[in-house]
Amino acid sequence: MDRVLGLVEKGRAVASGKRASAHLEQDGKKVVKPKRTQAALYVTDFEEQYARLDVSKCRTPADLLLIPDDEVTVEVVPRKLRTARSSVPSEVASQLQSLPPHVRDCLFAFEKNWLLLRWKYRHSARPTLRDAAVAGNTSAVSSSSSVSSVSAPLAVRELPLDSLPELRFEAQEFDWPEEVNNDIKMDESIIALPQKDATLEDIIRLEPRHDLFTMYRVPPSSSPNPYAPSSSKSSIPSSAPFADQLQPTDLRPVGAHLEHPRHTQLLVHMKELRLRIGEVDPFFLTAAVYDLDRDHRRRVSEFFHFELNISSTLSLVKGRPGPPSPLTSATQALFNLTHQSPTLYLVIRIETVLHGPYEQAADPYFKVSMKQKEKNKLISISEDCAHRMGRFTQPFGLAVVPLFAHGTALTAAPQEFFVTELLRVRDLSDMYLFSKASQLTVPASHLKKNFKVFPGHLTMDMRLMTTDEAVPNRFTPSLVPVLPQKDGAPIIREIQEFGLAKEESYPYLDYVNHLYVYPTFVNLGGYKGPASSRNITCVVYLLDSDEHAFSPTSLTLQSLNAMYGRGGMSTMVDHEVTSVTYHQHKPHFFEEIKILLPNRMTPHHHLLFVFKHITCRPVKGKKKNEPAPADVLGFAFLPLFVNGRFVKNGEHEISVAYELPAHYLREDLHDEMRWLDRRRPVFTVRSSLHSSVFSEVEQLDNFFHAYDDKESPDGVLIGAIHDLSQMDQATTANYMAVLFNQMLELVCTGSDAVAGAAFQQLITSIHTIQSLEQNLASHSASCSSSSSSGSGSGSGSGSGSVASMAPDAASTSRGGADSAGSVTNGDSASAAASSSAAGGARRAHKGTTAASVDRHPYLVSYVNFFYENFADADKKPFAEIVKTWSLLLFQRKDAAVVEHSLRYSWFFFDLIVKSIAQLLADTGQLPTNAASSSSSSTSGASVKRGTRVTPDFIQALAGLVSLLIRELHQLLPSNPVGHILNNTIALFVKDLFGIIDRGAVLGFIKLYCEEIDSGVVGSYFSGAKVEFLRIVMDYEHYVQLNIPIEPNFGTSIQKLLECFDSLQFFSSLIIREIGSIMKATIGEKHSPVRSSALALLRNAMLRHELDPRYQDPVKQQKIALLYFPYILMLMQFESNGSLITLADQTWIPSDMEDLLLCYLWVVKTVRRRFLRKWWKAETSGRVFFFFVVLAKALEVFGFRTAGEHKPKESVLLSPRQSTSTTISKMVDPIKDAALKQGSKNSFGTLARRRLKLKQLHKDSLNELGAPAGASPRMMGIIDHESPHPKTPRSEGKQNANTKRRAYLSLEVNSIVLELLLHFMSDFKSELGVEGNKHMDRVVCNFLLLLLKQNQSELFLSHLFQTVRFLVYNFPRPLFLYNTPYAGDLTYELLRACNFASERTRAQATGLLYIFFKTNWLIKKNLARMKLQCSIAIAKLVGEGGIADVARLQSALLAVVKQASLEKNPPEFVRQLDQLLSVRLITVLENTKLIEQFEYDNELVAELIYEISLGYRDSPDIRYTWLDSLAKRHGVEKNHEEAAQCRVHTTALIVAHLQLLKREDAVEVSRASLREAAPNCAEEFDTSSTSASEEGVCSSSAFSRQGLFRELQAAVASLKLEQIFETAIILQRIGSLIHKKKRDYAELVNVYNDLTGLCHNIVQSDELQGRLFANYYRVAFYGKDFGRADGQEFIYKEHGFVRLSDISSRLRDRYSAKFGADRVLTLPGTGVVDKSKLDPAKLYIQVCSVEPHLTDEQLKERKTPFQKNTNLKRFIFATPFQTSTDKELSETERTGKIKTVLRVEHPFPFVLKRIKVVSKKEIMLTPIQTSLEAIRGRTRALLQEIETKQPNSKTLQIVLQGSVLLQVNAGPLEFCRVFLGPDHVHKYQPAEVKALKHAMGEFVKTCVKALAVNKSIIDADQIAFHDQLVKGYVSMKTEVLKYIGVGQASQSASDLLKKAGSSNKIELASMRQIAQTSTDIRSARSGSNADVNLLSTSAATAAEK
């Protein structure tokens, strides 16, 4: 006890935060939980606050504040019997007090009413499908008629897709229809002017509006949360729109009370037995069902005794106990068939009266014909036997009827069967039947082969019974009448089923007390007495005394009349006899004797067996009709109740005595008795007890005795309790209710030791019950049938004593579809409710949800219906359960029992709740129904909640919760018990809200949240917490619990937070927990915990929106206030570290959508007055962050067609290129804050964040091919490079998903637009001030975001009205102050003027006119609009954003026309006409030209560049064109050209910042820029006139940030092309700027990047893996080529593009344009004679060229990069023949022409191709050609061996082409042709000398290369190296013959070693090599050590 008290103290310490640090195991590491400094058990004074509420003074609707007092009602549900009377006999009930306690407990269980907790409002808010048409389901779940209006269900609101019009978008998947706008006159100039007098309310009135959740789709989950339950069936069909979100968290079924099981039943009606010779003998039949499966043959029912004799025949029988009873005369029987199997047979045994020899009784029936005289004689003999031996029978025959085999097809309709196979069998025992089973189960046609068949038949009807069929006049196996009873109807006997497996056992429900006795065998061969012992029968008696002596001559008995009579007998008889086997000393018996046991058993109760010999032949001297003599042979007895225990089931071998003395049961008399056969056991009998009050199981029997004996010591009782764990499952199930009650009673009344033992045994028994494998099919049938009135058709297995789940109280109190309303006493329970209960039972067993995992229906029924507090217990059961359970967890003596207690924790939690509720009802603190017990049913409203339970109990409960959390730490995540325990704790806490102090319950929630994942937020424990909160949040009065009153916070945000924490504690706690999980998982891409947390919040809001109680908009506003802390939390996150930005770059899309959807719902629903008040009180930074989140929502939920792509970067990170106040500025403060936070940043250090983002970028590149992380909810994403893509349209209507996404996008945009309009209205004065940040960062940015997105025609109309509102109310920020707003908006309006919708174009055109006019009114000039329009048009052209130039031209002309129609100043009209009709129209004409050549990418790029050159005096426009060109290159993956464009724009920005002398001007080395981009010098040519215009260089590009963006974009492109050297140049420029500005944070990033670039260069040089560009000369011939006709260009291509690739690409391109038959390809290097070309054809000539560098340039350019950059000259060679003399060799007469081409601009350039401006040709003679070839080979070798890390693969390729004989014909051929003695005189001496020198250098280089190769090869390349050396020796020998021998300073052996040969080569040949030792040492492997190393062991031999 002291330890328990200590545990309670521990609970107090836990609740008050004083407990020491605990350790959690996470990933194998211990995590120390920090100590809590403060945590109160009662977190809030909720009850006091709630009591102080004055609803009349609150503006909140009353039903949002008031929690009903009748949440929980304790109801007594009258027990409905299926029988007409109680199963407990009246004589037993009258002796109740004298019965043992355990028997009284059993009888109480059979008679008690059900006690149920009714949760009146549970699930009242769950949406159901009232309108079946909504979900396409014809069946709907009906609710109880007693449900109050507050809980009336509301049909789920589905988006009426069929009735809604299609929203037409610009980027749409179908063609725009031809439309006629009645309000606008359609002509060449279309314009629609907005109404100036439109009010704010007119604009805000956005229609149509729909609920967010109506349009949102969540994919079915297996629940992202591994702790969440799997999807299960509920009232919402899976086809419903919210099937996944609306699944209830609480699917605990109330189940139903236990009722008799309903299996398939066989109704048999025996009609007639007819034999051929007619009615001669009386026959007595028995029927039973057998399972004759070869593996387990058994009988599965008791015997049904019946007779079909006519009355005259039956009257002949004398001696049978009578008179016949209607019950024993019944011919109809009902058999239970738990299992339907083809091995089931109905076996019918036929007996007749004893005749004597079997042949005498059977053979006459086989005669074909019989004379009447003979028949009369037979009748006479039969009558004589019936008179004399009518009490005795003998076997006659057997019939075996298959039930489900051999063609038998039983149905629900009666079928008549004629059984003609009546087999002649003299042994009817089970042993014989089983031995002949294989012969008996053959088809009927085969039976005659094995058995003789009596001529005749048995007629009977059979049919299968349905579970809901009520057949009248049934009687249970105990002969209790079953309802309904009907006078005159035939009696039907229910037959007891046997042989159920232990898993199919059921709890006993009725009083049953039967003993089945089966005499089996007796051996009287050793009988020594006066009588014969051949025709033996056994007479069985039940006696309650042994006072009388018995002998063969004295047999006076007073037996109990307790045996059930057979067919034709009385209902109950005092004895039974077995059949007689004629002339057998060792007969086998086959009878079943059924005995009704007394209710009080004593040691004197026993069975007496009397063996008799029957004299069959008539005895002379006796009268004819006198009974046949029956001589007593011996006696045997079987005590039934010894030492207080019932005899065990099974066989008993008993000795037979000749006579019995008085008190023969005494063992001390047995030795004096005279026994048969020396007291050997010669008699075998089997017994089987079927009782619901007595048990033959030793463990249970021992416990009952210890329990009944109140004086029993604790040790004995504890031992008996422990022994119960050895009991079998079937017995545990049978006595479940009684055992559970007794264990709980001992927990409450016993000592601590007894209580602990009882509690542990209760846990073990629960586990045993749960382990039962239920027959779910039969169980479902039982649960779904309607039997509220007790008229079900099923009979119970175990004499009607066992139970299944009944539906009469099945409207669920916890789960199921309809739980509200009360259970009526009549028959009003609907079929729907019954069906619901059936589903609940099935769910409970299958464990389909976390809330109902491992809930066996028997256990559910016990808790919910059976259990009630003990009337005489001094201690409160709930307190004792908590105390005992806590002690068990604290001590942990038995780990298995502890785990079971956790697995079935729901059982104890439900018991605690029910126990508390019953106590409160008994004391008047909870309402009860009229049938409740003695207490008054007054409402509990007047009793304070805080006094319902004691503070000590609250403390103990807190200790229990803390201990359970400790267990969770050990179980999660691997053990599934942890998930079960976690969910059951949540359900328990939720239940406590209805019965105890709610402040204490909130304290439990806080305790759990603090304990479960302290120190490991984001782990499995956090997932468990999410699931816990999900369940608790489903409390039906969750809203009222949070007291939704609008806080009065004045202007103090801190006070606002305090108000939320005080009033809305629960919702604020949940939001904080969700926030902590988001912070902890910010860097994880896919976090199931985070997904579950966000889904928790989303689904809570969804339920509120659909809750039928809260449909009033005012209520929705108040509820939204509960979640406003979510908004504040996100604002805090943004201000601390940009959670939105980081989450967007890391999280999976679905998480981001959930985060934003919750945000949108709150800001949409919350009261506007409150929002305005918060805006005014909040800091400007947080107000800005408020809109940052909305910006992200616009991006995520924007409508995108299937062909569009989401931005690769966040919208918030994509800068507005043409404005100084960019969208990226919305993130700049976030970045600044992150930098200031440094390592203290809440989301980790900056370096770690960047590393994560870098890895994420790498991952995203890998996933571009397969969008695995794409959101399944939002299809399509926007392309980053093309903000306004043109999507190919296809005909057809929008499908359902597309239309839903369209309306979701419309709603999100409408929410944002409405908020923006309110913000503009609320801050009108502030926004009009110059330099206001919100005008820039919020208003204009959001309008641009909305305009940039793919919007519907409907929404654009509202959006244009908002822009008009901006222009009319804020003209100065647009047109007077130095801002870019007008330019940005102008661009979007011009883009809209090109849309397909005429309505949209007209509205955009009208708004564009308003812009011009307002600009004039403000400034009296159009300078700003001129510049911005020009920039906008240039940007549209460059980005390909003009789908139809004619539309835009029409719009511009319409503006001019409108200006001329109105009374405008002439100068305004003139300037407008000059701009729109001349300047911009000219640009559009150029656009047409670009569109004309769209097929030629290179030509279009040239045109754009040329257009940009025309705007050198307008830097903004030139920048726009270059920017467009860079984007175009990026799309085409010309990354180096894109980088060049960015360097040019960088130069342009630098030049103009310096020219304008701006504050953010920077000093940049122009030489460095020219080094990076050789052609960028032209950008520095600026003039002062370009800076004189108004608004010039005002865009964000012309700023320091813009400069950095250009540099970084260039670097990114260069990295993609692996041009690392140029990237270093640009990064160094940036580093100098950062260094000068002391921006060390950025310097860190730059230097890190520089380090990486340098590593890349080193690595690429070592591996030689970089492929530099290839260059090709392309010439065009043909007039259709336009200005390219006759021109030559140098094309720069990627290193992997081959000559054939570019040739085929160009040919295909122009063939597609001009026709394949017109485009021809010319030879690559030949001279083209244009006069010989066909003018109608087009010719393309392509050849490969190489960069041409002079010797001086080669000396300066050492690295591969230097040799491949800043290239202006290129060369290619064309061979030619110098002579036609065929006697000359090919080498001797082949020369070549070298052509050097010079281009206009050096590569790299902003263009991919550059025009050739000059050409130079050089002609070489054959010897000069050979000289160049040999020098080229030498250079190739030197290039390979002079690299820092030579590559063996490439080196061996060059060596192979130089020294191997089979391929070295080139050098030898040169020597032979030009140096041979017959030819050398033909050439100039200088040329010959040069060739000889070149050949010598070639030979020396070869040996150097061989030496290098030797030093770098592996062992597997030695053989090839030897071949190279051998080839080198041969080649050099030949070459030296022509070039002569020079000075040799190195021995041949040294050379051989140097080369590394392993072959035996003559050393003399090596001495001829003229090569100095210096040359040898110059080789890379020239060390003495390397010289001495040989590649193979054979080298030594070669040296010798």
Image: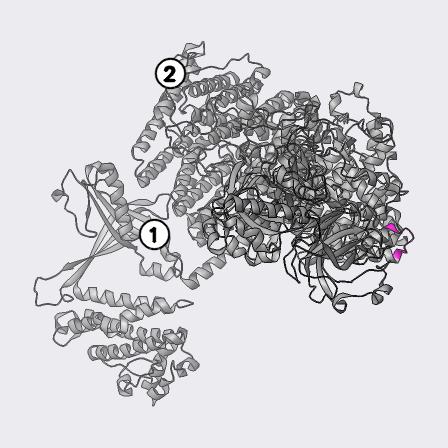
Q: Is residue 1082 visible?
A: no
Q: Nearer the viewer, mark 1 or mark 2?
A: 2
Mark with earlier residue (1, 2): 2
Q: Secondary structure at mark 2?
A: loop
Magenta-drawn segment = 708-714
- Decide if residue 1195 is in sight here: yes
**Quarter-wise, where is residue 1128 in the image?**
top right
Name the image quarter holding residue 1894: bottom left
Q: Residue 709 colored magenta?
A: yes
- Circles 1 and 2: CB atoms closer than 8 Å: no
Classify mark 1: helix, strand or loop.
Answer: strand
Which residue occupies the extreme bottom position in the image?
2000
Q: Main secondary structure of the magenta part?
A: loop
In this picture, is 1827 found above or below 1995?
Answer: above
Q: Nearer the viewer, residue 1713 or 1464?
A: 1713
* Of 1445 and 961, the residue lying toward us: 961
Q: Which residue is mark 1?
A: 1767
Residue 1047 sits inside the magenta stretch: no
Q: x and y percent of residue 1903 in the render?
A: 32, 76
Q: Residues within 10 Å of mark 1 (few under 14, many from 20)?
A: some
Q: Nearer the viewer, residue 1842 or 521?
A: 521
Q: Left or right: 1852 with respect to 661?
A: left
Q: CA distance from mark 1 to mark 2?
A: 52 Å
Q: Which mark is residue 189?
A: 2
Q: Using the image as rendered, state which of residue 1981 and residue 22 is in the foreground.
A: 22
Which mark identifies residue 1261? Answer: none
Q: In the rendered structure, which amino acid carries the disc numbered 1?
A: Leu
Q: Position of residue 1112 (x, y in %)?
A: 66, 21
Callout 2: 10 Å neighbours few (<14), some, many (20+)?
A: some
Task: Name the residue rendered at 13%, 73% in the picture.
Answer: 1881
Coordinates of residue 972 in the picture (x, y in percent): 68, 52
Report the side of 1519 relative to 1562 (left or right): left
